[in-house]
């Protein structure tokens, strides 16, 4: 199963952990020439400014150092920004504004709306400085490029004094995002359509045990399938199941399944299960409403304690021993990047998590790394013996647990409310927990149940 699953929310919690060395967010850039609000520049207006470098360093320490390294000396998690010469201003600002997301995973969070443009260019000025130092270039040549922002032909940097009204807060890029979620009055709420059809169609991933999969004999089954059925019953409508193959990213899956439909046709389902609930991921996918978290998934590893001669409390203790992962799964990504890559050479790839678990059973690998739900599911299916499963808790840039919930098309408040209430009841009366028990997977309540209430209020 592709890495895309659950990937949302894994890895990065933007702004959640400021480096010890500084506060996250803007620095006071009022000493620098102002930049007109909304006018994104593609060249650094502060090039060579010592003041900008100094402020940039503070902003860097608070926002970037945790990944790009103290003094910009990369520890291998993120690229070494000292390599980024002055020709790359537009590349720099593009990355900082948008961050880097691939396959549904956030490698670097977006900073637009977090930092104002002045802070971003101040960081850029500091990057220049570190570049010059790193490449042993003459820093005076860089300082000479600063003309105090006075030049007339440079529309970029406009001279202060700033009128009192134009406080830095106004310049911050938080406009627009919330305005997009506008209700469409012409189309009836999807709940009405479901009631008219007499059935709800629910989309789940294909071949994703123990959540949704087809065993050798019998129809499609799994925890998500059972939750979907129970949800339909609660809504007092019939249940139609749709299974789909994971696309490039979870964002694509949500687009294909709930709000736009696949370009090959087939329309959309009424709801999709097992979506990651990370707030930044929700923001990126604002055509969908995320609701009703029903489980908290956590990264973990499984091993045979007897064979390893005792308990293992951190994956690091496995160094030098083969660790199985499903190819391109979260376990795969995690092992190659976490702990500064210390376990990278120990990774052995398998077609799937159950295949890796089979190899654990036969002694081919010492441990398997995957989200604990998948590990537990594989344990029951394969009737593994002597397997201990532990969760991994990593601070810093790694978010090792994340809530899983439901996505529907945005602007369907009645459906959102109905699903929220139904899942809430199912959590309270033990229905969800019983389903997990039936599949031999320990239930972990979502970390943020209040998300449900918040989304319902939208
Ligand atoms: C959570 C970790 C994280 C944080 C925080 C972070 N970055 Fe990054 N950044 C990355 C990673 C990882 C990449 C490489 C992404 C990829 O694979 O393309 C990257 C890439 C970049 C790049 C492109 C570099 C290149 O060589 O392609 C720039 C520029 C950059 N970051 C600047 C910043 C700045 C400036 C900040 C602070 C405002 C920042 N980053 C904060 C993780 C982070």
Image (cartoon, rainbow, N blue to C red):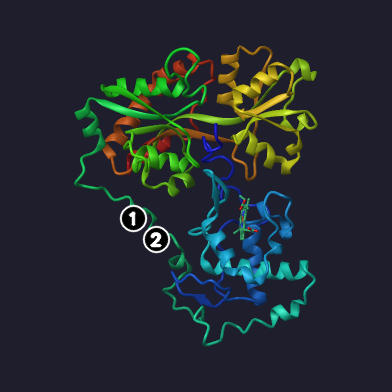
Tell me the SS state at disc 2. Answer: loop
Q: Is residue 53 above or below residue 287?
A: below
Q: Are marks 2 and 1 in contact (CB under 8 Å)?
A: yes
Query: Residue 54, percent across and down?
Result: 67, 70
Q: Residue at x 28, y 39 (%)?
A: 413
- 187 or 23, which lies in front? 187
Residue 263: x percent and y percent?
37, 43
* Distance from mark 2 CB to nearest ligand 1 atom below 8 Å: no
Which residue position holds label 1? 179
Q: Position of residue 276 (x, y in %)?
A: 48, 37
Rendering quadrant holding ligand 1: bottom right
Q: Quadrant of the C terminus?
A: top left
Q: Quadrant of residue 405?
A: top left
Asked whether, in this view, residue 142 is left or right of residue 443, the answer is right
Of the 4 image quadrants, the one containing the N terminus is top right
Task: Identify the residue shown where x is 77% and y is 66%.
Answer: 134
Which element is circle 1 on? helix
> In the figure, is residue 52 to the left or right of 433?
right
Q: Could one spot residue 391 in this view of the protein?
A: no
Mark 2 Cα-neighbour bin, 10 Å: few <14, some 14–19, many ≥20: few
* Residue pointed to by mark 2: 175
- Along the line of sight, the residue nearer the viewer: 88 or 25: 88
**Distance from the alpha carbon under mark 2 to that under mark 1:** 8 Å
Q: In the image, is residue 77 above or below residue 128?
A: above
């Amino acid at each position: 199963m592709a890495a895309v699953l659950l990937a949302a929310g894994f890895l990065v919690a933007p702004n959640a952990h400021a480096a010890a060395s500084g506060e996250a967010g803007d620095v006071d850039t009022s000493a620098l020439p102002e930049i007109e609000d909304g006018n994104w520049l593609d060249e650094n207006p502060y090039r060579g400014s010592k003041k900008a470098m100094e402020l940039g360093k503070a902003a860097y320490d608070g926002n970037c150092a945790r990944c790009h390294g103290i003094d910009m000396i990369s520890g291998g998690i993120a690229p070494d920004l000292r390599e980024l010469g002055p020709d790359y201003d537009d590349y720099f600002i593009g990355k900082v504004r948008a961050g880097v997301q691939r396959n549904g995973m956030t490698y670097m969070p977006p900073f637009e709306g977090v930092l104002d443009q002045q802070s971003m260019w101040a960081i850029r000025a500091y990057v220049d400085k570190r570049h010059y130092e790193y490449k042993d270039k003459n820093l005076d040549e860089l300082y000479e490029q600063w003309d105090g922002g006075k030049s007339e032909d440079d529309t970029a940097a406009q001279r202060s004094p700033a009128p009192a009204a134009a406080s830095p807060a106004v310049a911050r890029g938080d406009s627009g995002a919330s305005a997009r979620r506008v209700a469409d009055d012409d189309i009836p709420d999807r709940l009405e359509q479901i009631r008219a059809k007499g059935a709800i169609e629910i989309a789940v991933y294909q071949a994703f045990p123990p959540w949704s999969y087809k065993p050798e004999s019998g129809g499609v089954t799994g925890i998500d399938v059972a939750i979907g059925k129970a949800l339909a019953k609660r809504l007092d409508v019939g249940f139609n199941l749709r299974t789909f193959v994971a696309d490039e990213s979870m964002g694509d899956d949500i687009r294909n399944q709930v709000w736009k439909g696949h370009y090959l046709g087939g329309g959309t389902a009424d709801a999709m299960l097992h979506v990651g609930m990370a707030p930044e991921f929700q923001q990126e996918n604002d055509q969908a409403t995320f609701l009703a978290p029903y489980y908290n998934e956590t990264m973990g590893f499984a091993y045979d304690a007897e064979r390893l001669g005792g308990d293992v409390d951190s994956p690091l203790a496995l160094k030098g021993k083969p660790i199985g992962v499903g190819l391109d799964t979260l376990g795969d990504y995690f092992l190659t990047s976490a702990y500064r890559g210390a376990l990278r050479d120990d990774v052995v790839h398998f077609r799937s998590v159950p295949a890796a678990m089979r190899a654990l059973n036969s002694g081919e690998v010492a441990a398997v790394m995957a989200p604990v739900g998948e590990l537990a599911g594989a344990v029951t299916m394969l009737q593994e013996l002597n397997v201990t499963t532990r969760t991994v808790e990593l601070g810093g840039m790694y978010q090792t647990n994340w809530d899983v919930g439901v996505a529907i098309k945005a602007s369907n408040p009645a459906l959102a409310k109905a699903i929220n209430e139904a899942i809430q009841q199912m959590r309270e009366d033990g229905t969800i927990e019983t389903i997990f028990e039936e599949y031999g997977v320990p239930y972990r309540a979502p970390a943020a149940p209040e998300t449900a209430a918040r989304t319902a209020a939208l």
